[in-house]
DNA sequence: AACAACTGCAACCGCTCTAGT
DNA sequence: TACTAGAGCGGTTGCAGTTGT
Protein backbone atom coordinates (compact mmCIF):
# COMPACT_ATOMS: atom_id res chain seq x y z
CA UNK A 1 0.00 0.00 0.00
CA UNK A 2 1.52 3.23 -1.01
CA UNK A 3 2.17 5.41 1.89
CA UNK A 4 2.34 8.98 0.88
CA UNK A 5 5.88 10.15 1.14
CA UNK A 6 4.81 13.74 0.95
CA UNK A 7 6.42 14.85 4.18
CA UNK A 8 9.74 13.29 3.28
CA UNK A 9 10.34 15.79 0.57
CA UNK A 10 13.13 18.14 1.37
CA UNK A 11 12.39 21.80 1.65
CA UNK A 12 8.99 21.30 3.13
CA UNK A 13 8.31 23.09 6.31
CA UNK A 14 7.26 21.31 9.45
CA UNK A 15 6.12 22.42 12.82
CA UNK A 16 3.76 25.12 13.93
CA UNK A 17 1.88 27.09 11.36
CA UNK A 18 2.40 30.80 11.07
CA UNK A 19 -0.52 33.19 10.65
CA UNK A 20 0.70 33.89 7.13
CA UNK A 21 0.55 30.26 6.21
CA UNK A 22 -2.88 29.98 7.72
CA UNK A 23 -3.98 32.94 5.71
CA UNK A 24 -2.67 31.47 2.50
CA UNK A 25 -4.32 28.16 3.10
CA UNK A 26 -7.58 29.72 4.13
CA UNK A 27 -7.64 32.04 1.17
CA UNK A 28 -6.87 29.29 -1.26
CA UNK A 29 -9.49 26.91 0.07
CA UNK A 30 -12.11 29.59 0.25
CA UNK A 31 -11.56 30.37 -3.36
CA UNK A 32 -10.88 26.98 -4.88
CA UNK A 33 -11.85 24.41 -2.33
CA UNK A 34 -9.19 21.97 -1.28
CA UNK A 35 -9.45 19.58 -4.19
CA UNK A 36 -6.41 17.39 -4.11
CA UNK A 37 -4.51 17.96 -0.94
CA UNK A 38 -1.32 16.85 -2.50
CA UNK A 39 -1.50 19.47 -5.18
CA UNK A 40 -2.77 22.16 -2.91
CA UNK A 41 0.42 23.40 -1.24
CA UNK A 42 2.08 24.25 -4.52
CA UNK A 43 -0.99 26.01 -5.82
CA UNK A 44 -1.47 27.89 -2.59
CA UNK A 45 2.16 28.81 -2.38
CA UNK A 46 2.85 26.88 0.76
CA UNK A 47 6.02 25.04 1.65
CA UNK A 48 4.05 22.32 3.34
CA UNK A 49 3.03 18.84 2.46
CA UNK A 50 -0.55 18.22 1.53
CA UNK A 51 -1.11 16.13 4.55
CA UNK A 52 -0.02 18.91 6.81
CA UNK A 53 -2.37 21.28 5.03
CA UNK A 54 -5.25 18.91 5.37
CA UNK A 55 -4.64 18.54 9.05
CA UNK A 56 -4.32 22.21 9.61
CA UNK A 57 -7.55 22.78 7.78
CA UNK A 58 -9.59 20.03 9.36
CA UNK A 59 -8.32 20.55 12.87
CA UNK A 60 -7.96 24.24 13.05
CA UNK A 61 -8.92 26.46 10.15
CA UNK A 62 -12.23 24.99 9.13
CA UNK A 63 -14.91 27.60 9.75
CA UNK A 64 -17.34 25.18 11.31
CA UNK A 65 -15.10 24.34 14.19
CA UNK A 66 -16.06 25.23 17.69
CA UNK A 67 -13.12 25.84 19.90
CA UNK A 68 -12.80 26.27 23.58
CA UNK A 69 -14.00 24.50 26.62
CA UNK A 70 -16.08 21.39 26.30
CA UNK A 71 -19.53 21.68 27.77
CA UNK A 72 -20.86 19.25 30.30
CA UNK A 73 -23.10 17.83 27.66
CA UNK A 74 -20.18 17.29 25.36
CA UNK A 75 -18.14 15.63 28.07
CA UNK A 76 -21.00 13.33 28.81
CA UNK A 77 -21.38 12.47 25.18
CA UNK A 78 -17.72 11.72 24.80
CA UNK A 79 -17.66 9.45 27.80
CA UNK A 80 -20.73 7.59 26.75
CA UNK A 81 -19.60 7.15 23.22
CA UNK A 82 -16.17 6.14 24.30
CA UNK A 83 -17.72 3.45 26.42
CA UNK A 84 -19.49 2.25 23.36
CA UNK A 85 -17.01 2.85 20.59
CA UNK A 86 -13.64 2.93 22.24
CA UNK A 87 -10.93 5.08 20.75
CA UNK A 88 -12.71 5.65 17.52
CA UNK A 89 -12.38 9.35 17.66
CA UNK A 90 -13.72 10.13 14.27
CA UNK A 91 -16.87 8.18 15.02
CA UNK A 92 -17.20 9.97 18.30
CA UNK A 93 -16.57 13.29 16.63
CA UNK A 94 -19.46 12.64 14.30
CA UNK A 95 -21.74 12.90 17.27
CA UNK A 96 -20.24 16.13 18.42
CA UNK A 97 -20.85 18.74 15.80
CA UNK A 98 -18.13 21.30 15.42
CA UNK A 99 -15.56 19.30 17.33
CA UNK A 100 -12.71 17.56 15.63
CA UNK A 101 -11.57 14.08 16.35
CA UNK A 102 -8.18 15.40 17.28
CA UNK A 103 -9.64 17.79 19.77
CA UNK A 104 -11.81 15.13 21.29
CA UNK A 105 -8.91 12.75 21.45
CA UNK A 106 -6.77 15.32 23.18
CA UNK A 107 -9.52 16.23 25.57
CA UNK A 108 -10.06 12.63 26.43
CA UNK A 109 -6.41 11.98 27.02
CA UNK A 110 -5.77 15.07 29.05
CA UNK A 111 -8.97 15.45 31.00
CA UNK A 112 -11.57 12.78 30.87
CA UNK A 113 -9.29 9.81 31.09
CA UNK A 114 -7.71 11.18 34.20
CA UNK A 115 -11.00 12.09 35.70
CA UNK A 116 -12.31 8.60 35.23
CA UNK A 117 -9.14 7.15 36.64
CA UNK A 118 -9.53 9.33 39.68
CA UNK A 119 -13.02 8.04 40.13
CA UNK A 120 -11.60 4.55 40.11
CA UNK A 121 -12.94 3.72 36.71
CA UNK A 122 -10.78 2.14 34.14
CA UNK A 123 -10.95 4.54 31.20
CA UNK A 124 -10.39 1.75 28.76
CA UNK A 125 -13.06 -0.65 29.88
CA UNK A 126 -15.23 1.86 31.69
CA UNK A 127 -15.37 -0.51 34.56
CA UNK A 128 -14.30 0.01 38.12
CA UNK A 129 -10.72 -0.95 38.62
CA UNK A 130 -11.62 -3.25 41.43
CA UNK A 131 -14.48 -5.45 40.63
CA UNK A 132 -15.56 -5.62 44.21
CA UNK A 133 -18.71 -3.84 43.35
CA UNK A 134 -19.62 -6.65 41.15
CA UNK A 135 -18.85 -9.40 43.49
CA UNK A 136 -22.09 -9.20 45.26
CA UNK A 137 -23.13 -12.37 43.63
CA UNK A 138 -21.24 -15.02 41.87
CA UNK A 139 -22.76 -14.27 38.54
CA UNK A 140 -21.61 -10.74 38.28
CA UNK A 141 -18.14 -11.22 37.01
CA UNK A 142 -19.33 -13.62 34.44
CA UNK A 143 -21.97 -11.20 33.37
CA UNK A 144 -19.51 -8.39 33.27
CA UNK A 145 -17.32 -10.37 30.98
CA UNK A 146 -20.26 -11.06 28.78
CA UNK A 147 -21.17 -7.45 28.82
CA UNK A 148 -17.72 -6.52 27.80
CA UNK A 149 -18.09 -8.79 24.84
CA UNK A 150 -21.39 -7.23 24.12
CA UNK A 151 -19.95 -3.77 24.18
CA UNK A 152 -17.26 -4.85 21.81
CA UNK A 153 -19.78 -6.51 19.68
CA UNK A 154 -21.95 -3.45 19.70
CA UNK A 155 -19.04 -1.38 18.60
CA UNK A 156 -18.35 -3.72 15.77
CA UNK A 157 -21.99 -3.84 14.93
CA UNK A 158 -22.14 -0.10 14.48
CA UNK A 159 -19.23 -0.36 12.20
CA UNK A 160 -20.92 -2.99 10.13
CA UNK A 161 -24.04 -0.95 9.92
CA UNK A 162 -22.07 1.99 8.75
CA UNK A 163 -20.63 -0.07 6.01
CA UNK A 164 -23.98 -1.41 5.03
CA UNK A 165 -25.39 2.06 4.94
CA UNK A 166 -22.62 3.15 2.67
CA UNK A 167 -23.28 0.25 0.42
CA UNK A 168 -26.98 0.86 0.57
CA UNK A 169 -26.44 4.44 -0.39
CA UNK A 170 -24.49 3.39 -3.36
CA UNK A 171 -27.08 0.91 -4.33
CA UNK A 172 -29.90 3.32 -3.78
CA UNK A 173 -28.17 5.77 -5.98
CA UNK A 174 -28.25 3.39 -8.86
CA UNK A 175 -31.71 2.31 -7.84
CA UNK A 176 -32.95 5.87 -8.02
CA UNK A 177 -31.42 6.29 -11.37
CA UNK A 178 -33.08 3.23 -12.73
CA UNK A 179 -36.45 3.92 -11.16
CA UNK A 180 -36.55 7.65 -11.23
CA UNK A 181 -39.32 9.66 -9.67
CA UNK A 182 -39.56 7.71 -6.49
CA UNK A 183 -40.67 10.59 -4.34
CA UNK A 184 -37.34 11.46 -2.87
CA UNK A 185 -36.36 10.95 0.69
CA UNK A 186 -36.97 14.46 1.82
CA UNK A 187 -35.88 15.96 5.04
CA UNK A 188 -34.08 13.22 6.84
CA UNK A 189 -31.28 13.03 4.38
CA UNK A 190 -28.69 10.41 4.82
CA UNK A 191 -30.20 7.11 5.42
CA UNK A 192 -33.80 8.03 5.15
CA UNK A 193 -33.28 9.25 1.68
CA UNK A 194 -31.86 6.05 0.53
CA UNK A 195 -34.10 3.58 -1.09
CA UNK A 196 -32.49 0.69 0.60
CA UNK A 197 -31.81 0.06 4.13
CA UNK A 198 -28.96 -1.32 6.01
CA UNK A 199 -31.55 -2.78 8.24
CA UNK A 200 -32.15 -5.16 5.47
CA UNK A 201 -29.59 -7.44 6.75
CA UNK A 202 -29.08 -6.19 10.15
CA UNK A 203 -31.99 -4.81 11.96
CA UNK A 204 -30.69 -3.77 15.25
CA UNK A 205 -30.59 -0.10 15.78
CA UNK A 206 -33.90 1.43 16.59
CA UNK A 207 -33.20 4.75 15.03
CA UNK A 208 -31.69 3.12 12.08
CA UNK A 209 -34.80 1.17 11.55
CA UNK A 210 -36.98 4.14 12.09
CA UNK A 211 -35.14 5.96 9.41
CA UNK A 212 -34.68 3.23 6.99
CA UNK A 213 -38.18 1.94 6.95
CA UNK A 214 -39.55 5.33 6.27
CA UNK A 215 -39.18 6.31 2.72
CA UNK A 216 -40.19 9.65 1.42
CA UNK A 217 -42.27 10.38 4.43
CA UNK A 218 -44.55 7.44 3.87
CA UNK A 219 -44.39 4.40 5.92
CA UNK A 220 -43.28 2.07 3.34
CA UNK A 221 -41.66 -1.16 3.81
CA UNK A 222 -38.17 -0.84 2.67
CA UNK A 223 -37.45 -2.96 -0.34
CA UNK A 224 -34.97 -4.81 1.70
CA UNK A 225 -36.29 -4.33 5.13
CA UNK A 226 -36.81 -7.97 5.36
CA UNK A 227 -34.03 -10.37 5.23
CA UNK A 228 -34.34 -13.37 3.09
CA UNK A 229 -31.97 -16.14 2.58
CA UNK A 230 -30.23 -16.64 -0.63
CA UNK A 231 -31.02 -20.26 -0.40
CA UNK A 232 -34.42 -20.44 -1.96
CA UNK A 233 -35.46 -23.50 -0.13
CA UNK A 234 -35.05 -21.72 3.08
CA UNK A 235 -36.27 -18.42 1.97
CA UNK A 236 -37.92 -16.85 4.86
CA UNK A 237 -38.47 -13.65 6.52
CA UNK A 238 -35.96 -12.88 9.14
CA UNK A 239 -37.24 -9.77 10.68
CA UNK A 240 -39.83 -7.33 9.92
CA UNK A 241 -40.09 -4.24 11.92
CA UNK A 242 -43.33 -2.49 11.56
CA UNK A 243 -44.00 1.05 12.52
CA UNK A 244 -42.55 3.26 15.11
CA UNK A 245 -44.06 4.67 18.16
CA UNK A 246 -43.36 7.74 20.12
CA UNK A 247 -40.02 9.20 20.43
CA UNK A 248 -38.72 9.86 23.83
CA UNK A 249 -35.92 12.30 23.78
CA UNK A 250 -34.72 11.27 20.43
CA UNK A 251 -34.90 7.61 21.14
CA UNK A 252 -37.16 6.00 18.69
CA UNK A 253 -38.98 3.02 19.91
CA UNK A 254 -39.36 0.16 17.60
CA UNK A 255 -41.87 -2.54 17.94
CA UNK A 256 -41.07 -5.85 16.53
CA UNK A 257 -44.48 -7.12 15.85
CA UNK A 258 -43.43 -10.15 14.08
CA UNK A 259 -41.51 -11.56 16.99
CA UNK A 260 -40.46 -14.05 14.49
CA UNK A 261 -38.60 -16.85 16.04
CA UNK A 262 -36.21 -17.93 13.40
CA UNK A 263 -34.02 -19.75 15.77
CA UNK A 264 -36.22 -22.72 15.56
CA UNK A 265 -35.73 -22.84 11.87
CA UNK A 266 -32.10 -22.24 12.32
CA UNK A 267 -30.85 -24.48 14.99
CA UNK A 268 -27.35 -24.49 13.82
CA UNK A 269 -25.33 -21.40 13.41
CA UNK A 270 -22.88 -23.00 11.08
CA UNK A 271 -25.62 -24.17 8.87
CA UNK A 272 -27.14 -20.79 9.03
CA UNK A 273 -23.98 -19.14 7.93
CA UNK A 274 -23.70 -21.42 5.02
CA UNK A 275 -27.22 -21.00 3.94
CA UNK A 276 -27.24 -17.30 4.35
CA UNK A 277 -24.06 -16.84 2.51
CA UNK A 278 -23.64 -13.23 1.76
CA UNK A 279 -26.31 -12.28 4.17
CA UNK A 280 -24.34 -12.97 7.21
CA UNK A 281 -22.21 -10.16 8.27
CA UNK A 282 -18.67 -11.18 8.32
CA UNK A 283 -16.78 -8.14 9.35
CA UNK A 284 -13.76 -7.40 11.29
CA UNK A 285 -13.29 -4.73 13.79
CA UNK A 286 -10.14 -4.23 15.70
CA UNK A 287 -9.35 -7.84 15.66
CA UNK A 288 -12.80 -9.24 15.97
CA UNK A 289 -14.63 -11.37 13.61
CA UNK A 290 -18.30 -11.64 13.84
CA UNK A 291 -20.98 -13.46 12.05
CA UNK A 292 -24.11 -12.07 13.34
CA UNK A 293 -27.57 -13.08 12.40
CA UNK A 294 -29.88 -11.42 14.77
CA UNK A 295 -32.74 -9.17 15.33
CA UNK A 296 -33.22 -6.84 18.16
CA UNK A 297 -35.79 -4.38 19.16
CA UNK A 298 -35.76 -1.42 21.40
CA UNK A 299 -38.45 -1.40 23.94
CA UNK A 300 -38.94 1.49 26.22
CA UNK A 301 -35.85 0.46 28.01
CA UNK A 302 -32.77 -1.31 26.82
CA UNK A 303 -32.21 -3.79 24.18
CA UNK A 304 -34.26 -6.84 23.91
CA UNK A 305 -32.95 -9.58 21.85
CA UNK A 306 -35.77 -11.58 20.58
CA UNK A 307 -33.49 -14.09 19.25
CA UNK A 308 -29.86 -14.24 18.85
CA UNK A 309 -26.88 -16.36 18.71
CA UNK A 310 -23.71 -14.57 18.71
CA UNK A 311 -20.42 -15.98 17.91
CA UNK A 312 -17.49 -13.86 18.63
CA UNK A 313 -14.00 -14.84 17.98
CA UNK A 314 -11.37 -12.44 18.99
CA UNK A 315 -7.98 -11.84 17.58
CA UNK A 316 -7.82 -15.23 15.99
CA UNK A 317 -7.74 -16.84 19.38
CA UNK A 318 -11.28 -17.84 18.98
CA UNK A 319 -12.04 -17.16 22.55
CA UNK A 320 -15.48 -17.67 21.36
CA UNK A 321 -18.39 -16.48 23.19
CA UNK A 322 -21.22 -18.63 22.21
CA UNK A 323 -23.84 -16.84 24.08
CA UNK A 324 -27.16 -18.36 23.87
CA UNK A 325 -28.88 -15.35 25.01
CA UNK A 326 -32.49 -16.05 25.34
CA UNK A 327 -35.16 -13.54 24.89
CA UNK A 328 -34.70 -10.69 27.27
CA UNK A 329 -31.36 -12.17 28.14
CA UNK A 330 -29.39 -9.34 26.80
CA UNK A 331 -31.52 -6.81 28.53
CA UNK A 332 -30.97 -8.64 31.73
CA UNK A 333 -27.35 -8.84 31.05
CA UNK A 334 -27.07 -5.16 30.53
CA UNK A 335 -29.08 -4.38 33.52
CA UNK A 336 -27.40 -6.76 35.80
CA UNK A 337 -23.86 -6.47 34.82
CA UNK A 338 -23.30 -2.96 33.76
CA UNK A 339 -23.34 -1.69 37.24
CA UNK A 340 -19.82 -0.61 36.88
CA UNK A 341 -21.00 1.89 34.39
CA UNK A 342 -23.31 3.66 36.68
CA UNK A 343 -22.05 6.78 38.24
CA UNK A 344 -19.62 7.10 35.48
CA UNK A 345 -20.99 10.40 34.54
CA UNK A 346 -21.16 11.47 38.05
CA UNK A 347 -18.87 14.31 37.45
CA UNK A 348 -21.12 15.62 34.80
CA UNK A 349 -24.42 16.44 36.19
CA UNK A 350 -25.38 14.40 39.15
CA UNK A 351 -24.44 10.97 38.14
CA UNK A 352 -25.44 8.49 35.54
CA UNK A 353 -28.11 10.40 33.80
CA UNK A 354 -30.84 11.01 36.29
CA UNK A 355 -30.24 10.76 39.91
CA UNK A 356 -33.59 10.66 41.42
CA UNK A 357 -32.50 7.60 43.23
CA UNK A 358 -30.59 9.71 45.60
CA UNK A 359 -26.93 10.07 45.26
CA UNK A 360 -25.75 7.33 47.52
CA UNK A 361 -22.93 5.59 45.82
CA UNK A 362 -23.61 2.34 47.52
CA UNK A 363 -27.31 2.44 46.90
CA UNK A 364 -29.80 -0.32 46.88
CA UNK A 365 -29.73 -2.88 44.17
CA UNK A 366 -32.76 -1.29 42.66
CA UNK A 367 -30.93 1.99 42.38
CA UNK A 368 -28.12 0.07 40.99
CA UNK A 369 -30.26 -1.40 38.30
CA UNK A 370 -31.86 1.93 37.61
CA UNK A 371 -28.49 3.48 37.11
CA UNK A 372 -27.47 0.76 34.77
CA UNK A 373 -30.58 1.21 32.80
CA UNK A 374 -30.03 4.91 32.64
CA UNK A 375 -26.48 4.52 31.61
CA UNK A 376 -27.21 2.27 28.71
CA UNK A 377 -30.33 4.13 27.79
CA UNK A 378 -28.39 7.31 27.57
CA UNK A 379 -25.90 5.67 25.30
CA UNK A 380 -28.60 4.22 23.17
CA UNK A 381 -30.45 7.48 23.02
CA UNK A 382 -27.30 9.13 22.08
CA UNK A 383 -26.61 6.74 19.33
CA UNK A 384 -30.19 6.77 18.20
CA UNK A 385 -30.24 10.50 17.97
CA UNK A 386 -27.05 10.67 16.09
CA UNK A 387 -26.99 12.77 13.00
CA UNK A 388 -28.24 11.02 9.96
CA UNK A 389 -25.20 11.85 8.02
CA UNK A 390 -23.03 10.18 10.54
CA UNK A 391 -20.95 7.55 8.90
CA UNK A 392 -21.99 5.31 11.70
CA UNK A 393 -25.54 5.25 10.62
C1' DA B 1 13.95 34.46 40.56
C1' DA B 2 15.23 30.10 38.77
C1' DC B 3 14.47 25.68 37.82
C1' DA B 4 11.92 21.33 37.36
C1' DA B 5 7.76 19.01 36.70
C1' DC B 6 3.46 18.97 34.81
C1' DT B 7 -0.24 20.04 31.46
C1' DG B 8 -2.54 20.90 27.18
C1' DC B 9 -2.63 21.08 22.51
C1' DA B 10 -1.03 21.33 17.71
C1' DA B 11 1.23 18.73 14.59
C1' DC B 12 3.47 14.69 12.92
C1' DC B 13 3.97 9.70 11.91
C1' DG B 14 2.73 5.53 10.23
C1' DC B 15 -0.77 2.54 9.25
C1' DT B 16 -5.18 1.19 6.90
C1' DC B 17 -8.78 1.90 3.71
C1' DT B 18 -10.66 3.18 -0.70
C1' DA B 19 -10.97 4.57 -5.35
C1' DG B 20 -8.92 4.74 -9.71
C1' DT B 21 -6.29 2.61 -13.35
C1' DT C 1 -6.72 -8.82 -10.19
C1' DA C 2 -2.97 -6.22 -8.82
C1' DC C 3 -1.06 -2.07 -8.01
C1' DT C 4 -0.81 2.81 -6.70
C1' DA C 5 -2.06 7.35 -4.99
C1' DG C 6 -4.68 9.81 -2.00
C1' DA C 7 -7.24 10.38 2.07
C1' DG C 8 -8.44 9.34 6.71
C1' DC C 9 -7.59 7.67 11.27
C1' DG C 10 -5.46 6.80 15.73
C1' DG C 11 -1.27 6.99 18.35
C1' DT C 12 2.56 9.64 19.60
C1' DT C 13 5.67 13.49 19.98
C1' DG C 14 7.29 18.09 20.81
C1' DC C 15 6.84 22.35 22.62
C1' DA C 16 4.84 26.35 24.89
C1' DG C 17 2.56 27.66 28.88
C1' DT C 18 1.55 26.86 33.74
C1' DT C 19 2.31 25.40 38.33
C1' DG C 20 5.04 23.86 42.13
C1' DT C 21 9.28 23.91 44.80
Image: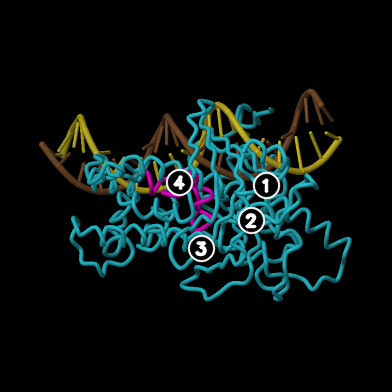
Chain colours: A cyan, B yellow, C brown
Question: Which residue is the site of mark 3?
Answer: A298
Q: Earlier in the sequence, mark 2 or mark 3?
A: 2
Q: CA distance from mark 4 to mark 2?
A: 44 Å
Instruction: Indicate left or right for A63 with A170 as reference.
Output: left
Instruction: Indicate left or right for A197 with A329 as reference.
Output: right
- Which residues make up the magenta segment? A83-109
The relative height of residue A38 versus residue A348 in the rendered view (above or below) is: above
Q: CA distance from mark 1 to mark 2?
A: 8 Å
Chain letter of the residue carrying label 3: A
Instruction: Indicate left or right for A186 with B13 as reference.
Output: right
Discs 4/3, front: 3
Question: Which residue is the site of mark 1?
Answer: A44
The relative height of residue A343 versus residue A184 in the rendered view (above or below) is: above
Which quadrant, please, contains the N terminus of chain A?
Answer: top right
Question: Which residue is the site of mark 4?
Answer: A151
Q: Earlier in the sequence, mark 4 or mark 1?
A: 1
Asked whether disc 1 touches disc 2, contact meaning CB atoms under 8 Å apart, the reply is yes
Marks 4 and 2 belong to one chain = yes
Question: Which residue is the site of mark 2?
Answer: A27
- What element does badge 1 sit on? helix
The relative height of residue A43 versus residue A296 in the rendered view (above or below) is: above
Amino acid sequence: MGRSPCCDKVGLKKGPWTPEEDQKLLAYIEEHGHGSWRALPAKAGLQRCGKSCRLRWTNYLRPDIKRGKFSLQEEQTIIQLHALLGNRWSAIANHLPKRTDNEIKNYWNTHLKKRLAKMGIDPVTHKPKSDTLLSRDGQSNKSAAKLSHMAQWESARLEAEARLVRESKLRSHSFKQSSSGGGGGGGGGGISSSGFSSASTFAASGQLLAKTTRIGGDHLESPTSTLTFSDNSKQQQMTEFVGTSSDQQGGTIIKDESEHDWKSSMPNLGEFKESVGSHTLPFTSTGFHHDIPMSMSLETTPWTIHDSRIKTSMGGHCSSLENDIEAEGFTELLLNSSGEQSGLLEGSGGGGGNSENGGESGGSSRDYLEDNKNYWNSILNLVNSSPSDSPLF
